[in-house]
Amino acid sequence: MPVLSIFFGIIVRMWHDDHPPPHVHVEYQGYEALVNISSGEVTKGRLPKTAAAIVKQWCLRHRGELMDN
């Protein structure tokens, strides 16, 4: 799966033709989650609270680019 970004040990990946709703796959220190691009919320899996907040902020900041992908 292509890596979109790595920051603070958080790895963000995305498939261009994955199932709806639009989301990214996130890995962090053994945790894995699917994160909705529109809301930045974890929809499946789990992330520590701080990592989830950082990913949410990142998704919202890059929402347009992510939706284009």
Image (spheres, rainbow, N blue to C red):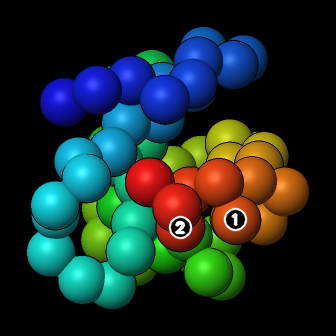
Residue 67 image label: 2
Residue at the location (49% across, 74% down)? 36
Instruction: State how far apart marks 1 and 2 are (Cα).
Output: 6 Å
Say which amino acid is labelled 1: Arg
- Residue pointed to by mark 1: 63
Query: Whole-percent x and y of residue 54?
Result: 78, 46
Given residues 52 and 6, the one toward you in this image is 6
Say which amino acid is labelled 2: Met
Say if 11 sits above or below 21 in the image: above
Residue at the location (70% across, 65% down)? 64
Query: Whole-percent x and y of residue 49?
Result: 69, 54
Residue 23 image label: none
**Mark 2 residue crowding within 10 angstroms, few (<14) / some (14–19) / many (20+):** few
Residue at the location (39% across, 23% down)? 3
Say which element carries label 1.
helix
Say which element carries label 2.
helix
Query: Whole-percent x and y of residue 42?
Result: 49, 70
Q: In this view, does 31 lie to the left or right of 35?
A: left
Say if 67 sits above or below 8 in the image: below
Circles 1 and 2: CB atoms closer than 8 Å: yes
Q: In which quarter of the image is residue 44?
A: bottom left
Q: Is residue 21 left or right of residue 11?
A: left
Given residues 61 and 45, the one toward you in this image is 61
